[in-house]
Amino acid sequence: GAGVSQSPSNKVTEKGKDVELRCDPISGHTALYWYRQSLGQGLEFLIYFQGNSAPDKSGLPSDRFSAERTGGSVSTLTIQRTQQEDSAVYLCASSLGGVEKLFFGSGTQLSVL
Amino acid sequence: GESVGLHLPTLSVQEGDNSIINCAYSNSASDYFIWYKQESGKGPQFIIDIRSNMDKRQGQRVTVLLNKTVKHLSLQIAATQPGDSAVYFCAENPLNNAGNMLTFGGGTRLMVKP
């Protein structure tokens, strides 16, 4: 069966531009997470969606970051006015609920020049 | 703040030997721990998990040990194979986080020598 799919796999953008990153979770998974991984670092929590509940946005580093999840499935992470420090791998994960056995996508490598 | 950390950033082992990857945590409220494996260019892959009411759990060639007294977690890989080469992350889920978030450590790179 299909796993978590993320697109694009790589994105190069210029400082100040907006970017959108897409995540298709595993079908039937109600929980969806976005994490950020900087080079050689661990994973930093960004945002969490669970069903129709209000998302947990406590990990978003600034108001330039936002995310939405439409129809309880596909999610889009938007970064406005990108900065060089936004360069990282953005990982999406989904699960049947909560943090147990998260399935991760391969990530989007974002490079801000 | 409280966080999950790792003792060794890089571990090199001979093929066929056993590997032990260590992780220290400081949040005594954590009740759930997970080990992930991340190969180059891929997302983290679930390996094994353990709840705080257990001190040991075994999977296929892997064992996770939890010592709550010293807040220490370890991942043991038996008969390490070249395919085990990857970065390994431990993660914790604090009870006081309402089950929403995993806090990840910085990762240990395992290198398997043929």
Image: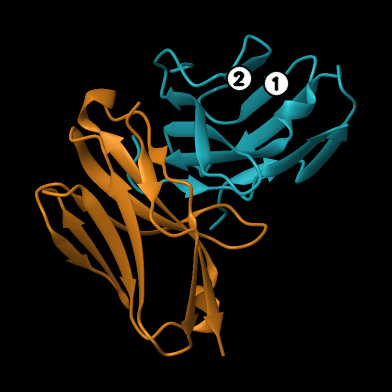
Chain colours: A cyan, B orange
A49 with respect to B55 (left or right): right
Which percent across, then down, holds residue A76? 65, 26
The residue under label 1 is A78
Quadrant containing the C terminus of chain B is bottom right
The disc label shown at residue A13, or none: none
Circle 1 Cα neighbour tier, 10 Å, few/some/many (<14 / 14–19 / ≥20): some
Which residue is at a point 48% across and 16% down the rendered structure image? Answer: A57
Q: Is residue A28 in sight in this rendering?
A: no
The chain identifier of the residue carrying mark 1 reads: A
Pick whichever of labels 1 and 2 is earlier in the sequence.
2
The kind of residue tagged 1 is Thr
Q: Which residue is mark 2?
A: A67
Question: In this rendering, does residue A109 appear at all?
Answer: yes
- The image shows residue B18, relative to residue A112, as above or below, that is below
Q: Chain of mark 2?
A: A
Q: Residue at x 62, y 56 (%)?
A: B42
* Helix, strand or loop for disc 2: strand
In the rendered structure, which amino acid carries the disc numbered 2? Ala
Q: Which image quarter is the N terminus of chain B in?
A: top left
